[in-house]
Image (cartoon, rainbow, N blue to C red):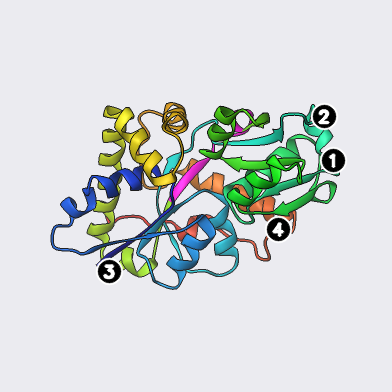
Amino acid sequence: TLNIGYQKAALKLIVAKQNQLFEKQFPHVKIEWKEFPAGPQTLEALSVNSIDFGYTGDAPIVFALSAGKQLNYLGYEQSSRQAHAILLPNQSSIKSLADLKGKRIALTRGSSAHNFLAETLKQAHLSWADIQPVWLTPSDARAALDKKAIDAWAVWDPYISAAEIDGNAKILFESTDLPTTYSYYLAQPNFVKNHPKDAEKVLAVLNQSDQWINAHPSEAAEILAKSTGLDVKVTQKVIAKKPKPNPVAILSSEAIQSQQKIADLFYSQKLIPNQIDAAQFVWKPAQ
């Protein structure tokens, strides 16, 4: 059995699931799909060996490794330059990042938005002590923003595209103004150690999926809409923002440094208990 952890917005994985790409690549293996609401839950499942590999944004991995979870980086891909944003209610009087001082900002604890907000505050010369973080899941944060129970929301796509199309929120700041970020595929250490050839096959399937998405953007938008329950206009916008092509590769030195920078930032801001060396968790296939 190959157990795969995915999220509603893990585009390559949900397209591979719909098109049975893993079933074709692993014809004599039972493929099991397990859905998780976000990265932290995916990594928890990995660490207790209930999945073989899964997908997440950048920050959850740093939290997991700092907490002593057993994980290996399998591969990475570039995130959209517009992958994250700070959203405000339409009538908000907030005009600049400096205006976030003292404000209630919703985000999902341990998610990629955690790193995005940390970088955004750094840009604004603010610290965590200057804001009131409100820890909410995306669905709860969306409801809180609509009711103006929070002042701002740090979140990732497709929630940004949905808010833009619905027209009941506006963007204060986007990740286009920050360094490039990456998303990652993480594996159970025993999986990559005992099945290195299968680990390489997993990366090959993900790249097959990427090629299919680029060749069939309309169908990919339909698949994403079905997975997320979002309007197809929203998912078309998400796919239009996607880097093309966007291959999955073994971690480069830039991707490792990106994770190390997040770890160093989080440790310096006392967001994680232990410092980590990201490079020591990177899987390298045998030459």
Residue located farthest toward the front when viewing the structure as drawn: 147
Q: Amino acid at mark 3?
A: Asn
How many angstroms separate mark 1 from mark 4 (CA)?
19 Å
Q: Amino acid at mark 1?
A: Lys
Q: Which residue is mark 1?
A: 101
**Direction from residue 145 to residue 38 in the image, left or right:** left
SS for dot 2: loop
Residue located farthest toward the bottom when viewing the structure as drawn: 48
Q: Which residue is mark 3?
A: 194
Q: Which residue is mark 2?
A: 93
Q: Nearer the viewer, mark 1 or mark 4?
A: 1
Label 2 near label 1: C-beta < 8 Å? no
Residue 259 visible in the picture: yes
If you read the primary sequence from the N terminus, does the residue marked by circle 2 or circle 4 appear first?
Answer: 2
Q: Amino acid at mark 2?
A: Ser
Compare residues 274 and 181 and report the one nearer the observer: 181
How many angstroms separate mark 2 from mark 4 (CA)?
29 Å
SS for dot 4: loop
SS for dot 1: loop
Q: Amino acid at mark 4?
A: Leu
The magenta stretch is: 175-184
Q: Around disc 4, counting alpha carbons within 10 Å, would you say few (fewer than 14), some (14 to 19), or many (20 or more)?
A: some
Task: Please say if 18 is above or below 238.
Answer: below
Q: Residue 248 in the image: x percent, y percent?
A: 36, 42
Compare residues 259 and 77 and report the one nearer the observer: 77
- Residue under the point 82% across and 29% down: 93
Q: Is residue 177 magenta?
A: yes
Q: Nearer the viewer, mark 2 or mark 4?
A: 2
Q: Is residue 173 magenta?
A: no
Q: Which residue is mark 4?
A: 271
Q: Nearer the viewer, mark 2 or mark 3?
A: 2
Task: Please say if 151 is above or below 109.
Answer: above
